[in-house]
Every structure is written in C-alpha cells, then in structure tokens.
C-alpha cells in the first residue's frame, strides 16, 4: 500500500526517536536515584503494601508478581541501558521486529513503575511518556519508511496535549480570561527556576502578551498540525518555541521537553529521503490494528475535552494508551512553603536550636537562588508544593517523611540537599512551619542579597518525636506524639 508510508519523514522519525530515548533515560535515572525512599520496601509508600490491596487488572505491573528493592533497581537500570542503546541507535542495526521489541522494553518497564508509583507518579507527564512510548514501538526503523497512521497519531497526541491545556485554562481560573495569570504564576509555580524571578518581574503588559500568545498557541495553532506542509511544520515549530519559553521560566520535569519531542515528529526536515524498502504485510496489519484501537479509545478524551466538567491529566485505561492532559486550570495568587526543622534539644521549645532541612529544588533559604533541574524530576520537592496547599494532599506520606528524618534514614536524606544533623546524631524532634514566600524586588535584592522574602504563617506540624517515653519522665509514662498524626490546621485552600 503506497499510502501507508511517508518516506519524506524519515529524518523526522530519526530525530524523534533519539530525543524520546533521552527522555526515557532521564525518567529511568530518576527512578533509580529516588525509589528506595519513596516506594521501596522501607519507603514512605511501599510497593508491597500497594500491590497487596490493588489487583493486577487495575494497575498492571511486573511488581505484582514479585517485589524487592533489588528487583526494582535491576528493572530501572535495565530501562537505562535500553534507553541509552536507543539513543545510540541500536534499533537501526537490527531487524524491524527486533527494533519494535527494543522500543517495547522501556515502555513495559516504565508502565510497571508508574502503575505502582502511587502519589509519587501521579503526574500528567508520566502518562504522556507512556502514550508517546507506545506509539514509538510502531514507528519502525531503517527497514521501512515511517507509517502515516503512526505519524498522524503522534500529531493527534500533540493536539490533545496543547488543546486540552488551552481548554482547561479558559474554563478554569478567570485570570486566564483576563490575561492576568502570569502576574502570579512565575512566582507561585511548583518549582521556580533560576530565571523565574526575572520573568515574574517583567512589566504587566508583557505578562498580558505572554498569556494571549499562550492562548493562540494552545487553542488555534494545534488545528494547523493537520494542515498540509509547510504549515504543519510551522505550527509544530511555534509549539516547540512556546515550550522552550516554559523551559526557561520554570522546572516542569520532562513535560516541556517531551512536548517538544512530539512537535519534532510533525516537522518535515529538508533533504531527500533515502530509498527504503516497502513495509512487510505483517507490519502493515499490526499498525492498522493498533491505529484502529487507539482511534476507538480516543472517544473518551474527546468527550472529556468537550465537556464543561473537563478534567485534566487522567488515564482512561490501566495501560495509559490514550489519556487526557492539561495544566494549571487554576493559578495560586500566593506562594506557601512548608519548612521542616529539627532540634537535638531534650525538650522542644520555641527557643530551641531549630535547624532547617534544605531541599534540592523547592524554595527554602531565602538567599539561595532557585536552580534548574528539569528534565530531571524531583518528586519529593514537587509533592511538598502540594503539601503547602493543604495537609490533605500529604496525608498519605508526610508522617512517614517526618519519621524517617527522625531516624536519619540514609535513603531519605539523599533526596535532600542538606541535613543539618550528622549521620550518627539524628534530631530528637522535628517540626514543620508554613511560610509565605514572595520574590524580592530589585531594590530588596540589592540591599539584602536575598531572592525570596518569607514570613511565618502558622505551625504546620507541632514538634514531633519518635514514639517512646518523654525525656525525663518516669518509665511507663507513655509515648510522645507520633509523626503519623494529622498536621495541626488545614492548609490554605488550593486555587
């Protein structure tokens, strides 16, 4: 079938596949470095506890068969190895069927991770990587020209990512309709980057232009992806440029980079296509069957997009084959941060020697400039942003985090930038306080050297110690407060 392939997109496929493999590599490296403290056997949300209550059919994963930290590490490192091989182009050195199996391996491994990752993996870019990775399995290698249907499905995915995000904004917070959201967003986003303060301090008319351009890119330009060339290439290029703007202004893990990768699949690069053999019949039949399945499954995200009760970042099947996306349907006007402190004093008082734990990415020390981490994903730092919105968002894991800090748990401390206590001398008490943060103005920055100005709002978690007798009490006097208890007051309502 001559219509089945598009040889002129051979270079687009090559660039897309190598870039996607890089994203896979980052995702698996993130899992390797963080899983023990988050979902390991002694993690805050252990995988064995999850698989004991959630059946395989609801969350298909290799770890339903068996789990150990060693097995998880082996799978994650295997994902790194295969991804690195795909970056190097090993899929071009093997037969078509073997190349498809190579692309299937990281998808299966990452699906197994996401489906047991619980809250730590409940981000839209996890499903986006899985949906993109599944389509990559059927894109072929140098033995066949890129299939038209798979290229179309990649554009359809990019359309849903952008158009869904645009709709959720227009239906959500009124500041998007008033073009004022970016008066706040650069300051209140989950994890600001090194240039976020610069973007925040831009004149308000520039913020209006930013929002208006975003609406055009997300609500109008996506339709041009299905126009003839070179219009589709121009549309994809505009989307990629918008995503690079977001890369500069914040830390959104690999969301922006993966969207750029999707845009590359729609770009028709100049140059003559090499002579490629025709597609084998079994390959054509398989691609047709998969395309038909995915088109059928697409009715659910379409119904969601046209619904007035549109939801964002939801998977409609346990394999994450076709999902709905969106981001920042509402924008916070004020930034809150949970600051965790510990003391080695025998009795916890307000004037005790409280020392602050420093996180890698989230704001802490006002004099410390935000760093760039994306596309690497600091999962704990992101969840701490949600914890600041309301303790309800952290109810399942915050107590476990405090407990591990009281134990000086090595794996947990590796997630942090710095612990204020020696490895052999854990704190006796840990507490958490809620602060309001804002970027300093230019004059404040010159005068104080601080990037942030912060003020205490209230206590988030009272001084807490490991269960046991109070210091100085009689034996058998009873346990002190336990870190699994509910934090003090409700946090600020999310916006």
Image (spheres, rainbow, N blue to C red):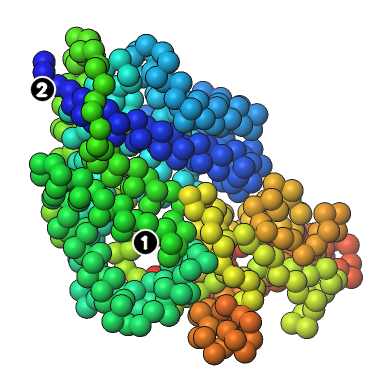
The residue lying furthest to the front in this view is 271
| Residue indicated by mark 1 | 245
Q: Quarter of the image containing the C terminus?
A: bottom left
Q: From what the image shows, is residue 358 above or below residue 375?
A: below
Residue 322 falls in image quadrant: top left
| Residue indicated by mark 2 | 3
> Residue 405 location in percent, x, y?
71, 57
The residue sitting at 10% across, 41% down in the picture is 228
Q: Dot 2, how many residues are within 10 Å of its Cα: few (below 14), some (14-19), or many (20+)? A: few
SS of the residue under disc 1: helix
On screen, residue 123 versus residue 384, left or right, reads left
Q: From what the image shows, is residue 369 above or below residue 114?
A: below
Q: Which mark is residue 357?
A: none
Q: Which of 147 and 106 is in front in this view?
A: 147
SS of the residue under disc 2: helix
> Residue 154 location in percent, x, y?
24, 37
Q: Is residue 322 visible?
A: no
Q: Is residue 264 visible?
A: yes
Q: Quarter of the image containing the N terminus?
A: top left
Say which label, 1 or 2, has the lower sequence index.
2
The residue sitting at 59% across, 70% down in the picture is 369
Q: Which of 342 and 373 is in front in this view?
A: 373
> Residue 5 location in percent, x, y?
17, 23
The residue sitting at 10% across, 44% down in the picture is 227
> Residue 329 location in percent, x, y?
29, 64
Q: Nearer the viewer, residue 462 or 252?
A: 252
The residue sitting at 34% across, 36% down in the picture is 16
Q: How far apart are marks 1 and 2 (CA)?
A: 37 Å
Residue 333 falls in image quadrant: bottom left
Q: Dot 1, how many residues are within 10 Å of its Cα: few (below 14), some (14-19), or many (20+)? A: few
């Amino acid at each position: 079938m001559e219509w089945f392939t598009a040889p002129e997109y051979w270079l687009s496929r090559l660039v897309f596949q190598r870039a996607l493999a890089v994203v896979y590599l980052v995702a698996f490296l993130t899992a390797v470095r963080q899983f023990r403290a988050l979902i390991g056997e002694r993690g805050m949300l252990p995988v064995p506890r999850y698989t004991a209550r959630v059946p395989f059919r609801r969350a298909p994963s290799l770890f339903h068969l068996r789990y150990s930290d060693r097995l998880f590490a082996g799978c994650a490192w295997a994902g790194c190895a295969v991804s690195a091989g795909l970056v190097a182009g090993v899929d071009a050195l093997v037969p078509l069927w073997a190349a498809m199996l190579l692309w299937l391996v990281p998808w299966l491994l990452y699906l197994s991770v996401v489906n047991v990752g619980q809250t730590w993996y409940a981000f839209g870019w996890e499903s986006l990587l899985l949906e993109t990775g599944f389509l990559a399995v059927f894109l072929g290698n140098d033995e066949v020209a890129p299939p038209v249907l798979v290229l179309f499905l990649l554009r359809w995915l990019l359309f849903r990512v952008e158009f869904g995000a645009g709709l959720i904004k227009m239906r959500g917070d009124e500041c998007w309709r008033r073009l004022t959201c970016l008066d706040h967003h650069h300051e209140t986003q989950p994890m600001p980057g090194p240039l976020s303060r610069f973007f925040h301090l831009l004149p308000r008319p520039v913020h209006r232009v930013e929002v208006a351009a975003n609406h055009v890119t997300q609500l109008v330009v996506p339709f041009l992806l299905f126009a003839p060339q070179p219009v589709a290439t121009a549309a994809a290029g505009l989307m990629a440029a918008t995503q690079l703007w977001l890369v500069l202004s914040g830390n959104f893990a690999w969301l922006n980079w993966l969207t750029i990768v999707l845009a590359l699949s729609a770009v028709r690069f100049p140059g003559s296509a090499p002579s490629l053999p025709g597609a084998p019949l079994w390959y054509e039949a398989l691609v047709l069957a998969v395309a038909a399945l995915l088109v059928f499954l697409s009715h659910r995200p379409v119904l969601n997009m046209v619904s007035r009760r549109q939801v964002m970042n939801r998977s409609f099947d346990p394999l994450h084959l076709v999902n709905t996306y969106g981001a920042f349907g509402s924008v916070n006007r004020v930034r809150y941060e949970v600051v965790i402190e510990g003391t080695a004093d025998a009795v916890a008082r307000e004037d005790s020697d409280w020392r602050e734990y420093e996180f890698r990415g989230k704001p802490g020390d006002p004099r410390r400039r935000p760093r760039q981490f994306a596309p690497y994903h600091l999962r704990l730092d992101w969840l701490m942003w949600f914890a600041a919105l309301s303790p309800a968002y952290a109810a399942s894991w915050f107590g476990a985090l405090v407990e591990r800090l009281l134990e000086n748990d090595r794996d947990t401390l590796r997630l942090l930038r710095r612990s204020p206590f020696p490895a052999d001398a854990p704190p006796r008490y840990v507490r958490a306080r809620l602060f309001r943060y804002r970027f300093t103005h230019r004059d404040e920055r010159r005068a104080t050297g601080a990037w942030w100005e912060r003020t205490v709002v209230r206590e988030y978690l009272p001084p807490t110690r490991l269960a046991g007798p109070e210091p100085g009490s009689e034996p058998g006097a009873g346990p002190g407060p336990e870190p699994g208890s509910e934090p003090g007051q409700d946090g600020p309502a999310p916006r």
